[in-house]
Amino acid sequence: MSDELITRAARDIVKAKKVVALTGAGMSVESDIAPFRGKGGIWEKYDPVEYAYIDTLRTNPAKTWILLSEMQREILKAQPNPGHLSLAELERLGFLSSIITQNVDGLHHEAGSKNIIEFHGNHRQAYCMECRKPIKSEEISLETLPPHCDCGGVLRPDVVFFGEAIPHEALTQSDQETRSCDVMLVVGTSAEVQPAASLPGVARSSGATIIEINIEPTSFTGYTSTYFIKGKSGEVLPKITDIIKNQSANLTS
Ligand code: APR
C-alpha cells in the first residue's frame, strides 16, 4: 500500500469542491460478505444467468431464492467495517458529498452515512410480488423457499435483478453527482457491470480526478483511473481519513 498515494488522495479530497464515492462488493468483503467475482465470488457458485435474472425469479422463484437466502443470511449478520465507517466519517467532516453504491447490503447506512444512492436497491427491504406489501427482510422466514406473503404471493428483495432497470431516481441522482464532482473515489468494484461502470468515465470526462482503491487492478486502472491505490478498502480508507483528520490544515498548503 503506497503511503505516497494515500497522502496524495488525502490532499486531493481536502482540496476538492465535491467528492463522490462509487462503491462495489469489495467494500463489504471485510464484513464477511462474498463478492460476486474473483476469489470466493458468488458467481463462481451460482450462474447469474440461471439464478439472478428477473425471468427466473418470475418463473422459478424457488431456484432464485436458493441464491437469495444465502445472500440474505450473510447480509443480515454483517457489520460495517472500517472502510464503511471511514466514508461515513468523511461525510460527517464535510469531505464526502455522496456515496453511489452498487451494494445491496445496506452497510453504508449501518455505518452512519446519510447521502447514499443505492444503485441496485437494498436487500434489507422486500415486498410481495402480488400485493406489493413491503416487508423487512429480517422478518422473512427462510424455512420454506420461496417465502410467501400472507396474501399468498411470492416475496422478493427490493434489489435490481439482471434484466431489470436501475431505479430512475438512482440513475438521475447518480448522473448529477457524477457530473458535478471533482474527485471520485472508486472503491472495490470490478468495473464490469453497466450502467454503474460507466460513471467513473463520465466523471473523468467532466474533469474529475478518479482515485481507484482495489486489491487488484481492473479495466479502469491506467485508463479511467487517475491513480490506483492497491489495498483493502478497510485499510486504505481509514489511512486516508486519519491523514485528513490529523493534517487537513497543512494538506491544503
Ligand atoms: N478491498 C477492496 N477491493 C476488494 C476487496 C477489498 N477488501 N476485496 C475484493 N475487492 C475487489 C475485487 O478485486 C473486485 O474488483 O472488489 C471487486 C469486487 O468485484 P465484484 O464482485 O464484481 O463486485 P461489483 O463490482 O460491485 O459488482 C457489480 O455486479 O453482479 C452484479 O449486482 C451485482 O452490484 C453487483 C455488480
Image: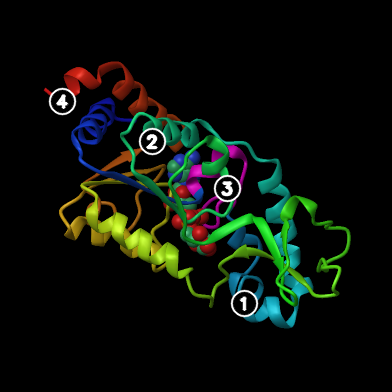
Q: Confirm if mark 2 falls within 8 A of ligand 1.
A: no
Residue bounds of the magenta highlight: 26-40
The type of residue carrying mark 4 is Thr
Q: Residue at x 56, y 67 (%)?
A: 160
The type of residue carrying mark 1 is Ile
Quick one: label 4 or label 2, which is nearer the N terminus? 2
Circles 1 and 4: CB atoms closer than 8 Å: no
Disc 4 to disc 3, how far (Cα)? 33 Å
Quick one: label 1 or label 3, which is nearer the N terminus? 1
Q: Confirm if mark 1 falls within 8 A of ligand 1.
A: no
x and y, in percent, of residue 161 in the image: 58, 70
Q: Which residue is mark 1?
A: 54
Q: Quadrant of the N terminus?
A: top left
Q: Which residue is mark 3?
A: 106
Q: Is residue 72 above or below residue 61?
A: above
The type of residue carrying mark 2 is Glu
How busy is the neighbourhood of tag 3: few (under 14 within 10 Å), some, or many (20 plus)?
many
Quick one: label 2 or label 3, which is nearer the N terminus? 2
How busy is the neighbourhood of tag 4: few (under 14 within 10 Å), some, or many (20 plus)?
few
From the image, give the main secondary structure of the stretch colored magenta. Answer: loop
Quick one: label 4 or label 3, which is nearer the N terminus? 3
